[in-house]
Amino acid sequence: MAGHVSLDKVRNIGISAHIDSGKTTLSERILFYTGKIHKIEEVKGKSGVGAKMDSMDLEREKGITIQSAATYCIWGDYNINLIDTPGHVDFTIEVERALRVLDGAVLVLCSVSGVQSQSITVDRQMKRYNVPRIAFINKMDRAGANPVRVCQQLREKLGHNAHFITLNIGAENEFKGIIDLVEMKACYFDGDNGENVRKEEVPADLLADAKKYRDDLVAAMGDFDDGVAEKYLNGEAVGTDELRKAIRKATISLKFTPVMMGSAYKNKGVQVLLDAVTYYLPTPTEVKNEALDQNKNEEKVILESNPDKPLVLLAFKLEDGRYGQLTYARIYQGTIKKGDFIYNVSAQGKKIKVPRLVRMHADEMHDIEEASAGDIVAMFGVDCASGDTFCSEGVAYTMTSMFVPAAVISLAVAPKDKATASNFSKALNRFTKEDPTLRVHRDEESAQTIMSGMGELHLEIYIERIKREYNCEVIAGKPQVAFRETITQKAEYNYTHKKQTGGAGQFAKVAGYIEPLPADAVETYEFVNDITGGAIPREFIPAVDKGFKEQMKTGLLIGHQMVGIRVVLDDGAYHDVDSNENAFKTCAMTALRECYMSAKPVVLEPIMKLQVQAPEEFQGGVLGMVNQRRGVIIGSSTNEGYGVVDAEVPLSEMFGYSTVLRSGTQGKGEFTMEFLKYAPVPRNVQEEMVKAYQAKRAAENK
């Protein structure tokens, strides 16, 4: 496909937004209008078929998107590669992955709720990867639709330089169509599914408003284009093409966000949005992509979207399909053909043959012979990890990897039936490979398999998938929170380790002090070697470091990992015969245990940023619920009959909160939370935790 189309006609875009803003419904309409599907299905429609992009059974049942689905479509003479991403904070890695490889995005906002908590997260991710965006205010047919307020929120909450490029004709159930402010034409959408776009003159009663907003737009464009500025100041009219050029330049510079509106569900405004994608979002050649040259000590190299240059492609997502591993990849430069040999730079240049190349349409595949720079394709039978870079022979570039957030919640999991254990481990292997935010490890103390992820929903979905896709019932334990321990003051240690058991003994002595690391330190542990005059021979220093590291895995208060400690070693002693690495390792471990308590240790717990939305009449109850859970209320506001409460709450108090919130607000309340920071636990809670841990240890040692 892209072999026949010049790169100026290719757009790689993503659709992302807050939960239930209508991303999947919008993708469904885009596929319909571009002729990719011939019948529109709703996300939770009566037919039970479910939207095309939600191809997993679970997605159709719950009416949410879990995986980002990729597809491509043709609009006019443009090729659009489209990725529909999830809105739930639990699946945030899917959004990270998609934005990492896209050139532009559509930020969908609800005309009633406006900028919500997850819109802010998505916007932050777009800024992280420098993705230019168009804002699309959806659900204009809902009661309480107010696009002007949403545009204001874009400016205030997200700091965007946002201006309307289309205007609504009527709103709520009177929503009839939109006015294109660039062309100054009214667009109406006729036919059963709004497929016939009818352009007319702007209605007389809206002409004054339209002129005012167009003037605002032209004035804003004056900052980016001198020609437009000059015409604006002289009071001359600015032509359609000239204004389009200025908007394109401004959007790609990331300093401007065009705002559009419509209703995907009522089939209004989608075609105009598709036009805007082709007019204002960048081509693959207009985006600066950097790689690191491994042969030249990670020197930065700018990649050109040129099909004749050496191949560089990034595998950004994996799926285990029926026919082996399917690897989604974005080609940054060069061309790839079926049967080519490529090299995985991230895995020490492993040579791999490409057996099959496909272009994805949600969960269907279309075989292709070759693909070139700027394309998003998938490869079959290529074994690699998420985030690996492939190159052709003689080039060793790697792309910078994605940002992977830390896991905040863990569950102990085990297969219900011993016979399904092999399926259980197969499932875990596959899912951890596909999803970097899902982590699985074995806890040696309790001999359990621990699964950690981004939230309750995240783990729940995976447990459900193991059951369905691998016929393996899973028993899940009580969720565990990732507590940490740290110290609050400096403490000195001086410990001698002696062991004489006939024959060669063990002897080691270490002395120095431990102190807390500053709050903004990146590392959780720092080892400083201040030994002078050879008090400990140099070959034993790594063993001392290893001993401290080993001991930091299990704290003495509640047995969780210690963090934020700087260990300084400034003295010691050794014996010519009896000292060895093992002796120094054991010595360091005991030294840390000895001085730990005098450094006033505290337990840290993960604090979550919580946003609760519920009708105003329940606001008192919602505030009470947050206070009960040791939450700190940061702010509360009301918005058209809805109260929004922002708070910081410990994760350990949040289990089962969704049920409590729903029953306390007649099912009308909803909340989102994401990890914010670690903070010390109140003293009374800490004492209880320490007691419980000691009792558990005593029971084990009996």
Image: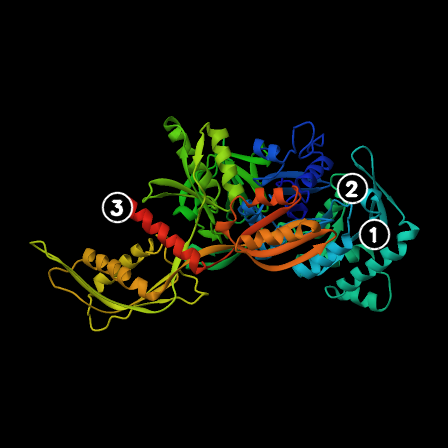
Q: Quadrant of the C terminus?
A: top left
Give the x, y percent position of residue 430: 44, 37
Residue that lies at the very extreme toward the bottom in this rendered image: 533
**Which amino acid lies under the numbered mark 2 shown in the image of this protein?**
Lys
Disc 2 designates what residue? 268
Per the rendering, the mark at residue 347 is none
In space, the residues marked 1 and 3 are separated at their CA atoms by 80 Å
Of labels 2 and 3, earlier in sequence is 2
Disc 1 designates what residue? 183
Counting other residues with Cα less than 10 Å from the Cα at mark 3, is it few (<14), some (14-19), or many (20 or more)? few
Counting other residues with Cα less than 10 Å from the Cα at mark 1, is it few (<14), some (14-19), or many (20 or more)? some
Give the x, y percent position of residue 180: 81, 50
Secondary structure, mark 2, is loop
Which of 32/297 is in front?
32
**Which amino acid lies under the numbered mark 3 shown in the image of this protein?**
Asn
615 left or right, relative to 655:
right
Residue 115 seen: no
Q: How is the image coloured?
A: rainbow
Q: Nearer the viewer, mark 1 or mark 2?
A: 2
Disc 3 designates what residue? 701
Residue positioned 48% across, 38% down in the render: 340
In space, the residues marked 2 and 3 are separated at their CA atoms by 69 Å
